[in-house]
Image: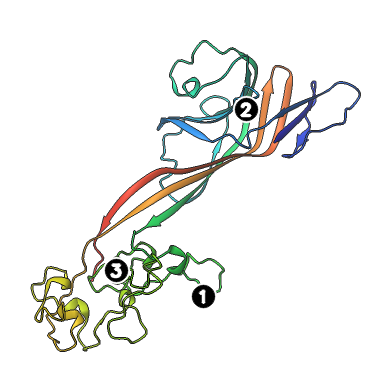
Amino acid sequence: MLTFKFQMKKILFLFIASFFLQSCDDGDIIITTFNFDDAKLEVCGELGDYVFYKVNPDAQESLSLKLGVTDSLYKTAGTKSYNINGTANFVNYRTYDGTVGNDYFCRSVPPTSPNVTVNYTGSDGTAEFTTVFEFDDNDGVPISKELDIDDEDGDDNPYTNPLDTDGDGLPNFYDVDDDGDNVPTALELDIQNLDGDNDPLTNPLDTDKDGIPDYLDDDDDNDGVLTRDEDENMDLDPRNDVTDPSIGADYLNDSVAIDYGVNLYREHKYTISKSVEIVLKNVVLISGEETLIQESLDMGTLLDVEDINKTTTPEF
Protein backbone atom coordinates (compact mmCIF):
# COMPACT_ATOMS: atom_id res chain seq x y z
CA MET A 1 0.00 0.00 0.00
CA LEU A 2 1.42 3.38 -1.00
CA THR A 3 0.14 6.60 0.51
CA PHE A 4 0.57 10.12 -0.81
CA LYS A 5 -0.28 13.14 1.28
CA PHE A 6 -0.44 16.64 -0.16
CA GLN A 7 -1.80 20.11 0.49
CA MET A 8 -2.97 22.62 -2.14
CA LYS A 9 -0.05 24.78 -3.42
CA LYS A 10 2.33 23.24 -0.88
CA ILE A 11 4.87 20.46 -1.26
CA LEU A 12 5.24 17.84 1.46
CA PHE A 13 8.09 15.36 1.42
CA LEU A 14 6.83 11.85 1.94
CA PHE A 15 8.02 8.36 2.60
CA ILE A 16 6.44 5.11 1.43
CA ALA A 17 3.91 3.96 4.01
CA SER A 18 2.12 0.68 4.45
CA PHE A 19 -0.91 2.16 6.16
CA PHE A 20 -3.62 4.78 5.63
CA LEU A 21 -3.01 8.16 7.19
CA GLN A 22 -5.82 9.13 9.53
CA SER A 23 -5.03 12.68 10.59
CA CYS A 24 -5.90 16.01 8.96
CA ASP A 25 -4.19 19.40 8.92
CA ASP A 26 -6.37 22.53 9.04
CA GLY A 27 -9.10 20.72 7.16
CA ASP A 28 -7.59 21.20 3.70
CA ILE A 29 -5.40 18.10 3.46
CA ILE A 30 -6.35 15.53 0.86
CA ILE A 31 -5.34 11.92 1.30
CA THR A 32 -4.67 9.94 -1.85
CA THR A 33 -3.96 6.25 -1.40
CA PHE A 34 -3.31 3.62 -3.98
CA ASN A 35 -2.30 0.03 -3.70
CA PHE A 36 -0.05 -1.71 -6.22
CA ASP A 37 1.35 -4.33 -3.83
CA ASP A 38 -0.36 -7.19 -5.67
CA ALA A 39 -0.06 -5.66 -9.13
CA LYS A 40 2.44 -7.20 -11.53
CA LEU A 41 5.00 -4.95 -13.16
CA GLU A 42 4.62 -5.17 -16.94
CA VAL A 43 6.53 -3.77 -19.90
CA CYS A 44 5.86 -3.12 -23.54
CA GLY A 45 7.44 -1.10 -26.32
CA GLU A 46 10.97 -1.25 -27.67
CA LEU A 47 14.27 0.60 -27.70
CA GLY A 48 13.51 4.32 -27.55
CA ASP A 49 9.91 3.78 -26.45
CA TYR A 50 9.71 1.59 -23.35
CA VAL A 51 6.66 1.67 -21.08
CA PHE A 52 6.71 0.04 -17.64
CA TYR A 53 3.39 -0.04 -15.84
CA LYS A 54 1.31 -1.49 -13.00
CA VAL A 55 -2.46 -1.55 -12.86
CA ASN A 56 -4.71 -1.90 -9.82
CA PRO A 57 -8.06 -2.93 -11.36
CA ASP A 58 -9.91 -2.74 -8.05
CA ALA A 59 -9.17 0.99 -7.65
CA GLN A 60 -9.08 1.63 -11.42
CA GLU A 61 -5.67 3.25 -11.20
CA SER A 62 -2.27 2.86 -12.82
CA LEU A 63 1.36 3.81 -12.32
CA SER A 64 3.53 4.00 -15.42
CA LEU A 65 7.05 4.95 -16.45
CA LYS A 66 7.88 5.88 -20.04
CA LEU A 67 11.51 5.87 -21.13
CA GLY A 68 12.67 7.22 -24.45
CA VAL A 69 16.27 6.04 -23.98
CA THR A 70 18.11 4.47 -26.89
CA ASP A 71 20.61 2.33 -24.96
CA SER A 72 19.86 -1.24 -24.01
CA LEU A 73 18.40 -1.25 -20.51
CA TYR A 74 19.52 -4.76 -19.63
CA LYS A 75 22.87 -5.07 -21.41
CA THR A 76 25.03 -5.07 -18.29
CA ALA A 77 24.46 -6.20 -14.72
CA GLY A 78 24.31 -3.53 -12.05
CA THR A 79 22.45 -0.28 -11.45
CA LYS A 80 21.82 2.52 -13.94
CA SER A 81 19.84 5.73 -13.42
CA TYR A 82 17.78 7.69 -15.92
CA ASN A 83 16.60 11.25 -15.38
CA ILE A 84 12.87 11.88 -15.40
CA ASN A 85 12.37 15.08 -17.37
CA GLY A 86 8.64 15.20 -18.10
CA THR A 87 9.16 14.81 -21.85
CA ALA A 88 11.02 11.76 -23.17
CA ASN A 89 11.15 10.17 -19.72
CA PHE A 90 8.17 10.63 -17.45
CA VAL A 91 6.01 9.00 -14.78
CA ASN A 92 2.22 8.96 -14.65
CA TYR A 93 -0.17 8.16 -11.84
CA ARG A 94 -3.74 8.01 -13.16
CA THR A 95 -7.22 7.01 -12.10
CA TYR A 96 -9.99 6.11 -14.53
CA ASP A 97 -13.74 5.83 -14.79
CA GLY A 98 -13.51 2.21 -15.92
CA THR A 99 -11.32 -0.86 -16.11
CA VAL A 100 -7.88 -0.41 -17.66
CA GLY A 101 -6.44 -3.18 -19.83
CA ASN A 102 -2.87 -3.79 -20.96
CA ASP A 103 -3.70 -2.44 -24.42
CA TYR A 104 -4.06 1.01 -22.87
CA PHE A 105 -0.26 1.22 -22.51
CA CYS A 106 0.90 -0.96 -25.37
CA ARG A 107 -0.84 0.77 -28.27
CA SER A 108 0.68 3.70 -30.13
CA VAL A 109 -2.70 5.46 -29.89
CA PRO A 110 -4.37 4.88 -26.46
CA PRO A 111 -8.03 3.77 -26.55
CA THR A 112 -10.67 6.43 -26.00
CA SER A 113 -12.02 4.67 -22.94
CA PRO A 114 -11.85 4.49 -20.04
CA ASN A 115 -11.52 8.20 -19.38
CA VAL A 116 -8.74 9.54 -17.17
CA THR A 117 -10.22 11.16 -14.06
CA VAL A 118 -6.97 12.03 -12.23
CA ASN A 119 -3.59 12.50 -13.89
CA TYR A 120 -0.27 13.25 -12.17
CA THR A 121 2.82 13.57 -14.37
CA GLY A 122 6.38 13.17 -13.13
CA SER A 123 8.55 16.14 -14.12
CA ASP A 124 11.69 15.42 -12.10
CA GLY A 125 13.54 12.62 -10.32
CA THR A 126 15.34 9.46 -11.43
CA ALA A 127 14.39 5.97 -12.46
CA GLU A 128 16.87 3.48 -11.05
CA PHE A 129 17.26 0.16 -12.89
CA THR A 130 19.08 -2.68 -11.15
CA THR A 131 19.69 -5.57 -13.53
CA VAL A 132 20.62 -9.02 -12.24
CA PHE A 133 22.02 -11.80 -14.41
CA GLU A 134 21.16 -15.40 -13.56
CA PHE A 135 23.29 -18.05 -15.27
CA ASP A 136 22.09 -21.58 -15.90
CA ASP A 137 24.28 -24.30 -17.36
CA ASN A 138 21.65 -27.01 -16.78
CA ASP A 139 24.30 -29.33 -15.35
CA GLY A 140 22.22 -30.56 -12.41
CA VAL A 141 24.36 -28.86 -9.75
CA PRO A 142 22.62 -26.01 -7.86
CA ILE A 143 24.32 -22.66 -8.30
CA SER A 144 24.59 -22.33 -4.52
CA LYS A 145 27.15 -25.16 -4.55
CA GLU A 146 29.21 -23.61 -7.33
CA LEU A 147 29.98 -20.22 -5.79
CA ASP A 148 32.48 -19.02 -3.19
CA ILE A 149 30.44 -20.64 -0.45
CA ASP A 150 33.39 -20.63 1.98
CA ASP A 151 33.98 -16.90 1.38
CA GLU A 152 37.68 -17.51 0.78
CA ASP A 153 38.23 -13.90 -0.31
CA GLY A 154 36.44 -12.55 2.78
CA ASP A 155 34.18 -10.10 0.97
CA ASP A 156 30.85 -11.78 1.83
CA ASN A 157 29.99 -11.91 -1.88
CA PRO A 158 29.88 -15.48 -3.24
CA TYR A 159 29.91 -14.21 -6.84
CA THR A 160 33.26 -12.39 -6.73
CA ASN A 161 35.33 -15.55 -6.39
CA PRO A 162 33.16 -18.44 -7.62
CA LEU A 163 34.51 -21.94 -8.08
CA ASP A 164 36.35 -22.67 -11.34
CA THR A 165 37.52 -26.22 -10.85
CA ASP A 166 39.21 -26.66 -14.23
CA GLY A 167 40.62 -23.14 -14.43
CA ASP A 168 39.21 -22.58 -17.92
CA GLY A 169 37.91 -19.09 -17.15
CA LEU A 170 34.28 -20.20 -16.89
CA PRO A 171 33.03 -20.36 -13.29
CA ASN A 172 31.40 -23.67 -12.42
CA PHE A 173 27.96 -22.08 -12.24
CA TYR A 174 27.90 -21.61 -16.01
CA ASP A 175 30.44 -24.26 -17.01
CA VAL A 176 28.75 -27.37 -18.41
CA ASP A 177 31.93 -29.37 -17.76
CA ASP A 178 33.17 -28.34 -14.32
CA ASP A 179 36.36 -30.42 -14.31
CA GLY A 180 37.28 -29.82 -17.96
CA ASP A 181 37.50 -33.51 -18.84
CA ASN A 182 35.18 -33.17 -21.88
CA VAL A 183 32.52 -35.27 -20.16
CA PRO A 184 29.55 -33.01 -19.29
CA THR A 185 28.91 -32.56 -15.58
CA ALA A 186 25.28 -33.64 -16.01
CA LEU A 187 26.47 -37.09 -17.15
CA GLU A 188 28.77 -37.59 -14.16
CA LEU A 189 26.09 -37.34 -11.50
CA ASP A 190 23.71 -40.07 -10.27
CA ILE A 191 21.92 -40.11 -13.61
CA GLN A 192 20.56 -43.65 -12.98
CA ASN A 193 19.06 -42.59 -9.64
CA LEU A 194 20.69 -45.54 -7.90
CA ASP A 195 19.82 -44.20 -4.44
CA GLY A 196 16.19 -43.64 -5.43
CA ASP A 197 15.94 -40.08 -4.13
CA ASN A 198 15.51 -38.45 -7.56
CA ASP A 199 18.38 -36.09 -6.77
CA PRO A 200 21.32 -36.68 -9.14
CA LEU A 201 23.67 -34.70 -6.89
CA THR A 202 23.35 -36.67 -3.64
CA ASN A 203 25.20 -39.71 -4.98
CA PRO A 204 27.30 -38.58 -7.95
CA LEU A 205 29.60 -41.02 -9.74
CA ASP A 206 33.01 -41.57 -8.16
CA THR A 207 34.62 -44.22 -10.37
CA ASP A 208 38.00 -44.43 -8.61
CA LYS A 209 36.49 -44.08 -5.11
CA ASP A 210 38.93 -41.31 -4.19
CA GLY A 211 36.28 -39.15 -2.54
CA ILE A 212 36.23 -36.70 -5.44
CA PRO A 213 33.09 -37.10 -7.57
CA ASP A 214 33.71 -37.65 -11.27
CA TYR A 215 32.23 -34.28 -12.22
CA LEU A 216 35.07 -32.60 -10.26
CA ASP A 217 37.76 -35.21 -11.01
CA ASP A 218 39.83 -34.76 -14.18
CA ASP A 219 41.15 -38.35 -13.94
CA ASP A 220 38.05 -40.40 -13.23
CA ASP A 221 39.71 -43.84 -13.10
CA ASN A 222 42.93 -42.62 -11.41
CA ASP A 223 45.17 -44.32 -13.98
CA GLY A 224 47.50 -41.35 -14.32
CA VAL A 225 46.08 -40.21 -17.66
CA LEU A 226 43.57 -37.37 -17.64
CA THR A 227 40.07 -38.30 -18.75
CA ARG A 228 40.26 -35.66 -21.50
CA ASP A 229 43.40 -37.32 -22.92
CA GLU A 230 41.86 -40.81 -23.14
CA ASP A 231 40.03 -39.76 -26.30
CA GLU A 232 41.51 -41.94 -29.05
CA ASN A 233 39.47 -40.53 -31.93
CA MET A 234 39.99 -36.99 -30.57
CA ASP A 235 36.36 -35.95 -31.13
CA LEU A 236 36.27 -34.27 -27.68
CA ASP A 237 34.07 -37.04 -26.31
CA PRO A 238 35.94 -39.65 -24.25
CA ARG A 239 32.73 -41.64 -23.75
CA ASN A 240 32.89 -43.31 -27.19
CA ASP A 241 36.47 -44.59 -26.92
CA VAL A 242 36.13 -48.16 -25.65
CA THR A 243 38.82 -50.84 -25.56
CA ASP A 244 36.99 -53.30 -23.29
CA PRO A 245 33.18 -53.14 -23.72
CA SER A 246 32.68 -55.21 -20.57
CA ILE A 247 34.11 -52.37 -18.51
CA GLY A 248 33.18 -49.33 -20.54
CA ALA A 249 34.96 -46.29 -21.90
CA ASP A 250 38.71 -46.13 -21.49
CA TYR A 251 38.53 -43.11 -19.18
CA LEU A 252 36.68 -45.36 -16.68
CA ASN A 253 39.04 -48.34 -17.16
CA ASP A 254 42.24 -48.07 -15.13
CA SER A 255 43.75 -50.93 -17.13
CA VAL A 256 43.90 -48.71 -20.20
CA ALA A 257 46.15 -45.68 -19.81
CA ILE A 258 47.07 -44.26 -23.20
CA ASP A 259 47.60 -40.51 -23.42
CA TYR A 260 46.45 -39.02 -26.73
CA GLY A 261 47.25 -35.45 -25.67
CA VAL A 262 43.90 -33.78 -26.29
CA ASN A 263 44.52 -30.10 -25.63
CA LEU A 264 41.06 -28.78 -26.48
CA TYR A 265 37.85 -28.16 -24.55
CA ARG A 266 34.45 -28.97 -25.94
CA GLU A 267 31.87 -26.31 -26.77
CA HIS A 268 29.82 -24.93 -23.87
CA LYS A 269 26.22 -23.73 -23.97
CA TYR A 270 24.45 -21.88 -21.19
CA THR A 271 21.63 -19.39 -20.64
CA ILE A 272 21.60 -15.93 -19.09
CA SER A 273 18.23 -14.85 -17.69
CA LYS A 274 17.99 -11.18 -16.80
CA SER A 275 15.72 -9.60 -14.21
CA VAL A 276 15.40 -5.90 -13.40
CA GLU A 277 14.13 -4.01 -10.36
CA ILE A 278 12.86 -0.47 -10.93
CA VAL A 279 12.85 2.14 -8.16
CA LEU A 280 11.79 5.74 -8.65
CA LYS A 281 13.76 8.26 -6.58
CA ASN A 282 12.75 11.81 -5.62
CA VAL A 283 9.94 11.86 -8.15
CA VAL A 284 8.00 15.12 -8.53
CA LEU A 285 4.38 14.50 -9.53
CA ILE A 286 2.30 17.42 -10.74
CA SER A 287 -1.40 17.83 -11.47
CA GLY A 288 -2.42 21.42 -12.02
CA GLU A 289 -1.41 23.34 -8.90
CA GLU A 290 -0.94 20.19 -6.85
CA THR A 291 2.59 18.83 -6.40
CA LEU A 292 3.81 15.70 -4.64
CA ILE A 293 7.36 14.52 -4.06
CA GLN A 294 8.04 10.86 -3.41
CA GLU A 295 11.49 10.02 -2.03
CA SER A 296 11.41 6.37 -3.07
CA LEU A 297 8.83 4.36 -4.93
CA ASP A 298 9.48 0.71 -5.73
CA MET A 299 7.75 -0.16 -9.00
CA GLY A 300 8.66 -3.82 -8.66
CA THR A 301 10.75 -6.43 -10.46
CA LEU A 302 10.51 -7.88 -13.94
CA LEU A 303 11.63 -11.49 -13.90
CA ASP A 304 13.17 -13.03 -17.02
CA VAL A 305 12.86 -9.74 -18.86
CA GLU A 306 15.46 -11.00 -21.32
CA ASP A 307 16.92 -14.47 -21.96
CA ILE A 308 20.11 -15.02 -23.91
CA ASN A 309 21.53 -18.33 -25.09
CA LYS A 310 25.32 -18.29 -25.07
CA THR A 311 27.77 -20.58 -26.83
CA THR A 312 31.50 -20.47 -26.11
CA THR A 313 34.56 -22.69 -26.23
CA PRO A 314 37.07 -22.09 -23.42
CA GLU A 315 40.66 -21.54 -24.46
CA PHE A 316 42.95 -24.32 -23.38
Looking at the image, tell me whether mark 1 or mark 2 is earlier in sequence order. Answer: 2
Q: Nearer the viewer, mark 2 or mark 3?
A: 3
The CA span between labels 2 and 3 is 59 Å
Looking at the image, tell me whether mark 2 or mark 3 is earlier in sequence order. Answer: 2
The CA span between labels 1 and 3 is 30 Å
Task: State if disc 3 and disc 2 touch (CB < 8 Å).
Answer: no
Dot 1, crowdedness within 10 Å: few (<14), some or many (≥20)? few
Tell me if residue 91 comes above or below residue 276 in the rendering: above
Q: Determine the secondary structure under disc 3.
A: loop
Dot 2, crowdedness within 10 Å: few (<14), some or many (≥20)? many
Please state which of residues 136 and 164 is positioned toward the viewer in this rendering.
Answer: 136
Work out which residue is located at the far right of the displayed protein and give it.
26
Looking at the image, tell me whether mark 1 or mark 3 is earlier in sequence order. Answer: 1
Residue 116 is left or right of residue 79, and the answer is right
Q: Determine the secondary structure under disc 1.
A: loop
Q: Determine the secondary structure under disc 2.
A: strand
Mark seen at residue 290: none
Kindly identify which residue carries mark 2: 122
In the rendered view of the protein, which quadrant contains the N terminus? top right
Please state which of residues 110 and 284 is positioned toward the viewer in this rendering.
Answer: 110
Please give the name of the residue rendered at 67% of the width and 32% of the height, measured from the top-left corner. 35
Mark seen at residue 192: 3
What's the residue type where badge 1 is placed?
A: Asp
What's the residue type where badge 2 is placed?
A: Gly
Colour pattern of the rendering: rainbow
Q: Nearer the viewer, mark 1 or mark 3?
A: 3
What's the residue type where badge 3 is placed?
A: Gln
Kindly identify which residue carries mark 1: 150
Q: Position of residue 244 (x, y in %)?
A: 10, 81
